[in-house]
Amino acid sequence: MFELDLRSRKPIYEQLVDKLKELIINEVFKPDEQLPSVRALAQDLTINPNTIQKAYRELENQGFIYSLKGKGNFVSQNNGVMDTQKIDLVLNELEKLIQEAFYLGVKPSDLIAVIEKLKAPKGGDEYYD
Amino acid sequence: MFELDLRSRKPIYEQLVDKLKELIINEVFKPDEQLPSVRALAQDLTINPNTIQKAYRELENQGFIYSLKGKGNFVSQNNGVMDTQKIDLVLNELEKLIQEAFYLGVKPSDLIAVIEKLKAPKGGDEYYD
Amino acid sequence: MFELDLRSRKPIYEQLVDKLKELIINEVFKPDEQLPSVRALAQDLTINPNTIQKAYRELENQGFIYSLKGKGNFVSQNNGVMDTQKIDLVLNELEKLIQEAFYLGVKPSDLIAVIEKLKAPKGGDEYYD
Amino acid sequence: MFELDLRSRKPIYEQLVDKLKELIINEVFKPDEQLPSVRALAQDLTINPNTIQKAYRELENQGFIYSLKGKGNFVSQNNGVMDTQKIDLVLNELEKLIQEAFYLGVKPSDLIAVIEKLKAPKGGDEYYD
DNA sequence: GTGGTCTAGACCACG
DNA sequence: GTGGTCTAGACCACA
């Protein structure tokens, strides 16, 4: 289910954060759904539970999940409220990457194609819901 | 000129790499132009020269600058050759960020606007405005 | 095990890179095997850990090893993909050396003998004999 | 006549040494022929005379040229005597490169082809004369 | 424990 | 003057 690259330079816990974020964004994990327990996931991936914990804590900090003591970790509601601060961060990152892509010779139309491709994450049109 | 965040989790030399890359891409530093000397920049930023060295060396590895022993560091020509491997990396990163942007409520048209804005790095670019 | 010439014009870290590359190519260090830790090797060779680091990082850039933060440095798999760019560099170097060998009086048959001797790096290799 | 890459990592004087060595080996400069004067060559290549000097001194050390005070620099006779020490050095270097070539996927037959190609440097068969 | 970053300061090589 | 290498020693991040 998770394809972690144990050989990547990127820390395992960061890879986990990215994967989980992706699954949440694509609603594979739906709002208020419970995530796998730390221990279960650790055993599953044969990874140190501390590493899983760290990933979950990071996701909590970023607002993607919430944790209930003694119950587990759950997917946050993606409330319609726009977190402008986070949006600015993401857009800033995006600008840098877009410029780099241009520098490397990518054409604007290619990028627009990427956007079109990703427009409908699950089949509908629910970017915000 | 450079705003480094010494407290950031991101290593100083990486921040430097990013900043310099950006300046090169935006042609603030033009091809074959000499970059600030290691020592000069180190003194400027009150940072250890070794750290600057590391950043410059990384930029050299990435093909953005070249280094001449007794002379200095210089901006590489952006040869038209498409480095497909690097392009793939960048596009991959872009996809993740775009999805995250959608999740945060950004609309596709907003992203396309960003692309349009950045389309012509030569002509209408305002870094400080 | 490693014979470094601290007086050589060639930097220590480059000598290290060459030695380690050789050991990897000859499968003295096998794929996915862990290399000596930075500190251990540094103590062994009575050399500064930073210098070892530099060598390991260079080997990583060249694709011979990969590095895991809390774990160590490991030998990369030699994927069958032909890196034509690197091959060209090596062949170019080889041509120069072959010409020089001819100039010094070495006969073509001698060189072919060398090639035959090295043909099978797995089977009949004696590093110390 | 000389194509120096002023942007290469390799020091200019080393490039000069290589080029001149090549020209001598290929008998473009014949035994006892006078080489261009330091000043002339420096002007020609718009390079610091010190750099030329350094290259000539290096070639002298390696036995490729000899210098007559007040007269100039001249190509050495390639006497039939085999400099076994130098040959060993070169063969050693060659072995390492050949192994690396194998590791990169080059086939023995390819290397033999290179040798065949270089066998006759100027049209005859005079490897040693 | 591992690798990674950073500093302070010395010395060498190049042009 | 420039970049490049190396050391000694400190501190952080990861698993």
Image: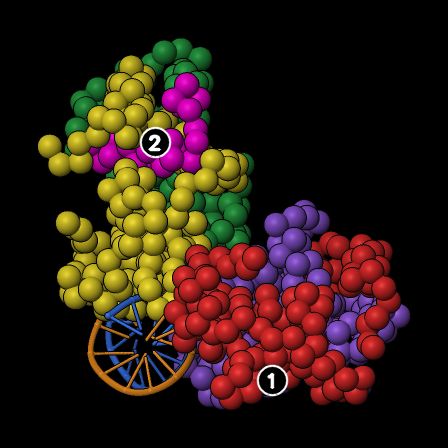
Chain colours: A red, B purple, C yellow, D green, E blue, F orange
Q: Which residue is mark 1?
A: A66
Which of the two residues, D118 or B91, is positioned nearer the viewer here?
A: B91
Quarter of the image where one finds residue C25: top left
Q: Residues within 10 Å of mark 1 (few under 14, many from 20)?
A: many
Q: Residues within 10 Å of mark 2 (few under 14, many from 20)?
A: many
Which of the two residues, A61 or C50, is positioned nearer the viewer here?
A: A61
Q: Position of residue C86 (x, y in %)?
A: 47, 40
Q: Which residue is mark 2?
A: D98
Q: Residue at x 21, y 19 (%)?
A: D80
Is residue D98 covered in magenta? yes
Magenta highlight: main SS: helix
Q: Is residue D119 left or right of residue A80?
A: left
Which of the two residues, D7 or A114, is positioned nearer the viewer here?
A: A114
The disc label shown at residue D125, or none: none
Q: Secondary structure at mark 1?
A: strand
Hey, what amino acid is under mark 2? Ile
Task: Report the magenta residues as a range.
Answer: D87-111
Q: Residue at x 29, y 15 (%)?
A: C109
Q: Position of residue C4 (x, y in %)?
A: 19, 53
| Residue D120 in the image: above or below residue F8 | above
| Residue D62 in the image: above or below residue C74 | above
Which of discs 1 and 2 lies nearer the camera? The answer is 1
Q: Secondary structure at mark 2?
A: helix
